[in-house]
Image: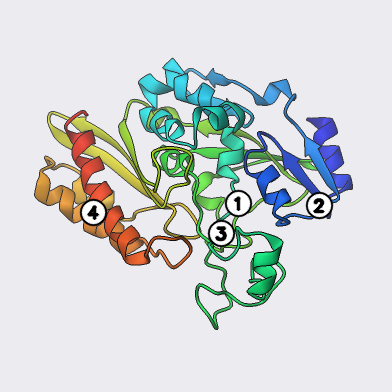
Amino acid sequence: MEEAVGYLAKHDLGIRVLAGGTDLIPSMRQGLFDSEHVLDIRHIGELRGIRPRPGNGVEIGALTTLAFIERADFLRRHYPVLTEAAATVASPLLRNMGTIGGNICLDTRCLWYNQSLTWRKGCGFCIKKDGDLCHVAPGGTKCWAAFSADTPPALLCLNAEVEIASASGVRRMRLSDFYTGEGDAYRKLQANELLTRVFLPESSADYRGVYRKLRIRGSIDYPLAGVAVAMKRSNGYVADARLAITAVNPAPLLVKGVTEMLEGKAVDEALAESVGVLAAKTAKPLTTSALTPEYRREMIRVFTKRAVMAVANGN
């Protein structure tokens, strides 16, 4: 760790971090990153593993693979929304390589950005890379590239925190504060910093949870809309509930008002439909993918309703 953050401090203007490499390497081949150095951190053992902390939840090393999280009995018993989300990422091969830290830090995606250099040059480039125009919202000064990772909405539902290290020390912050809502500078992580650990609090343990994902193929594809739900019930009524969405905004978002809408109530079709409508209003998909924004927003509504009913019914 000390050596790694030392390299980051020395080369902060031209360095990229390689963890699993499942997103970084294809992006470098497309010419999206032109870093002078790549820092391979795959063999830092202290950043791997799942460590329960009695009375304080669980600590997950940033280099823990998504496949390991998917199969972890402790997480499946106590934080099932996370294992469900991890199980949907890409394919088994990529989950064996990809890490939880990499998924949290996944680059935002856009139809105009994730292309070859020749293609992007023909379009005059974009705000996110080499240009000053947003093709999604022409005339605007904001990048609308969508954040499309699967595990962050589940982690948001669990009130997760992340640890960030640099040569000057360690800081810890809520995951909900980690993302900026901007498509280009999308995370609060400086070039000389490294995301090292994820913390799930004891207070979020034993919530029922599900994750529902829209994608064109049954595997490999990034989500075009994703919904995570975590819920705790008591005597047939909702004691607490959280819902987060992904792939339809420049950041994963907790949907505000869900707890108040569900708390103290028994879930039925009408109530689940109301939650779906609320989630759809939070979603702001634009033309960043092959599917229309209207369809993706509608799928947020549909998937939210299904997810809420599934959790309430224990499915």
Residue located beneath label 1 in the image: 107
Q: Choose top left, top right, bottom left or bottom right for residue 170.
A: top right
The numbered mark, 3 or 4, whose residue comes first in the sequence reads: 3
Residue located beneath label 4 in the image: 276
- Do we see residue 57 in this rendering? no
Using the image, determine if residue 205 lies above or below residue 156.
above
Residue located beneath label 2 in the image: 35
Q: Position of residue 48 (x, y in %)?
A: 64, 23
C-alpha separation, residue under disc 3 versus residue under disc 4 = 25 Å
The numbered mark, 1 or 3, whose residue comes first in the sequence reads: 1
Residue located beneath label 3 in the image: 180
**Amino acid at pointer 3:** Thr
**Viewer-nearest of discs 2 and 4:** 2
The numbered mark, 2 or 4, whose residue comes first in the sequence reads: 2
Q: Determine the residue positioned at 26% across, 39% down.
A: 240
The numbered mark, 1 or 4, whose residue comes first in the sequence reads: 1
Which of the two residues, 203 or 216, is positioned nearer the viewer here? 216
Q: Where is residue 69 in the image (x, y as percent from the top left)?
A: 50, 25
